């Protein structure tokens, strides 16, 4: 698992502190969406379908910092839209880094290389580049030719300047396991720190509704992709979550683990479902009926195995028992052990 020691220490200390305090529900990652506007129009995206008056909205740096302070999660993921479009994004990131938050700035990398000078390299900042496979698969997924090559060039430039770089990959029903495994080889060959993978998000607004993964297909696909894993592959994710994707472990969703704050407020209950918004993080946590969401509890959640709901469950398993911690260590050292 390619997570820096300093980040692992911070997260471990944070989780254990919550447990010692008897806190039942706590956030691990703040999903901070300062805008929905993007410079791509991917068929599987549900964010860019909003009308222009919504796409023109931006969170201010002060709003972003306030959300980070209010939520207090140690990690902040900044998806979009395309965050690098935001004219104040360098200021937003700078304020979060000053708070010693581990920031994952998600980007399709189209603007990344030309904006690198605006972001000083830091252990607290990672460019998380959206890569949906090898050249043909990626360019098809983002509905534009040439984006894969632009992203690869930007990744190389960022690494040369000392930036932390990871990739994040969303897989859909038509993914080819052997091609995905070759893609992992390519990304490791570039020198990225680690990879994140997840089944396709079931966005209601997405133009393409045909290729979202059902639960049985998810476990089948990820078993083929992650079976007999190469030792050189590094994943920036919980080993137990990867086992969950392969159908080797069962978890219930932990929707409060990755709360979302965007131009509408605090999104209920998670990044994927739009069940209204809360005006504060406290209201989100205290007035959301969390028992109404998750596998077997809500038909909208029936096939979901997405990281924003289930990776926090895997982390809870790791720190919730000695057996969970021991299993995490074993899989980290011996990923193919039975």
Image (cartoon, rainbow, N blue to C red):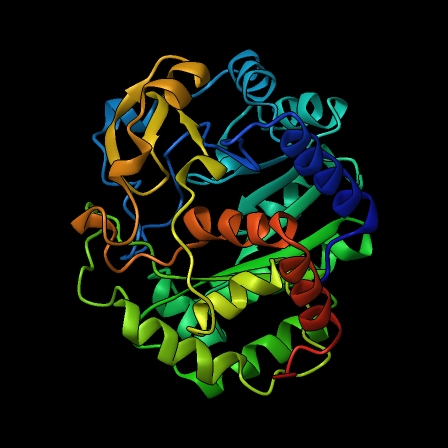
Side (left or right) of 142 relative to 46:
right
Which quadrant, please, contains the N terminus?
bottom right
Side (left or right) of 63 relative to 103:
left
Side (left or right) of 236 relative to 216:
right
Which residue is nearer to you in this view: 188 or 290? 290
Is 229 placed above or below 171 here? below
Residue depicted at 55% across the width and 22% down the height: 71
Residue 235 in the image: x percent, y percent?
A: 64, 64
Which residue is nearer to you in this view: 52 or 304? 304
Q: Tell me which corner region of the image, top left, top right, bottom left or bottom right, holds residue 172.
A: bottom left
Is 327 placed above or below 17 here? below
Q: Tell me which corner region of the image, top left, top right, bottom left or bottom right, holds residue 286.
A: top left
Residue 186 in the image: x percent, y percent?
A: 63, 77
Which quadrant, please, contains the C terminus?
bottom right
The mark total stands at 0
The answer to whether one can see residue 154 in this image is no
Residue depicted at 64% across the width and 83% down the height: 336
Residue depicted at 41% across the width and 67% down the height: 139
Is 79 placed above or below 22 here? below
The answer to whether one can see residue 285 in this image is yes
Residue 242 in the image: x percent, y percent?
A: 53, 67
Is 50 placed above or below 318 here? above
Residue 144 in the image: x percent, y percent?
A: 37, 62
Residue depicted at 56% across the width and 37% down the height: 29
Which residue is nearer to you in this view: 86 or 241? 241
């Amino acid at each position: 698992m390619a997570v820096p020691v300093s980040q692992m220490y911070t997260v471990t200390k944070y989780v254990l502190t919550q447990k010692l305090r008897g806190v039942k529900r706590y956030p691990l990652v703040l999903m901070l969406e300062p805008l929905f506007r993007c410079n791509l129009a991917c068929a599987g995206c549900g964010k860019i379908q909003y009308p222009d008056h919504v796409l023109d909205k931006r969170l201010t740096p002060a709003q972003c910092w306030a959300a980070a302070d209010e939520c207090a999660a140690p990690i902040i993921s900044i998806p979009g839209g395309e965050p690098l479009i935001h004219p104040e994004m360098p200021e937003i990131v700078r304020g979060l880094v000053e708070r010693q938050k581990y920031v994952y700035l998600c980007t399709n990398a189209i603007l990344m290389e030309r904006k690198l000078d605006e972001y000083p390299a830091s252990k607290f900042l990672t460019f998380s580049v959206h890569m949906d496979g090898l050249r043909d698969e990626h360019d098809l997924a983002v509905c534009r030719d040439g984006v894969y090559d632009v992203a690869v060039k930007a990744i190389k430039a960022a690494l040369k300047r000392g930036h932390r770089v990871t990739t994040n990959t969303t897989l859909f029903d038509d993914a080819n396991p052997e091609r995905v495994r070759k893609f992992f080889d390519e990304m490791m060959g570039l020198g990225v720190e680690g990879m994140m993978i997840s089944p396709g998000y079931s966005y209601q607004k997405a133009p393409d509704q045909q290729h979202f993964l059902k639960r049985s297909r998810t476990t089948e696909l990820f078993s083929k992709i992650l079976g007999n894993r190469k030792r050189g592959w590094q994943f920036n994710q919980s080993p137990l979550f990867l086992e969950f994707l392969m159908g080797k472990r069962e978890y219930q969703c932990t929707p409060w683990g990755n709360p979302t704050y965007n131009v509408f407020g605090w999104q209920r209950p998670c990044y994927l479902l739009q069940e209204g918004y809360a005006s504060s993080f406290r209201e989100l946590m205290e007035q959301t009926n969390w028992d109404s969401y998750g596998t077997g509890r809500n038909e909208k959640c029936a096939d979901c195995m997405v990281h924003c709901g289930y990776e926090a469950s895997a982390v809870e398993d790791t720190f919730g028992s000695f057996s969970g911690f021991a299993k995490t260590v074993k899989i980290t050292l011996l990923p193919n052990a039975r």
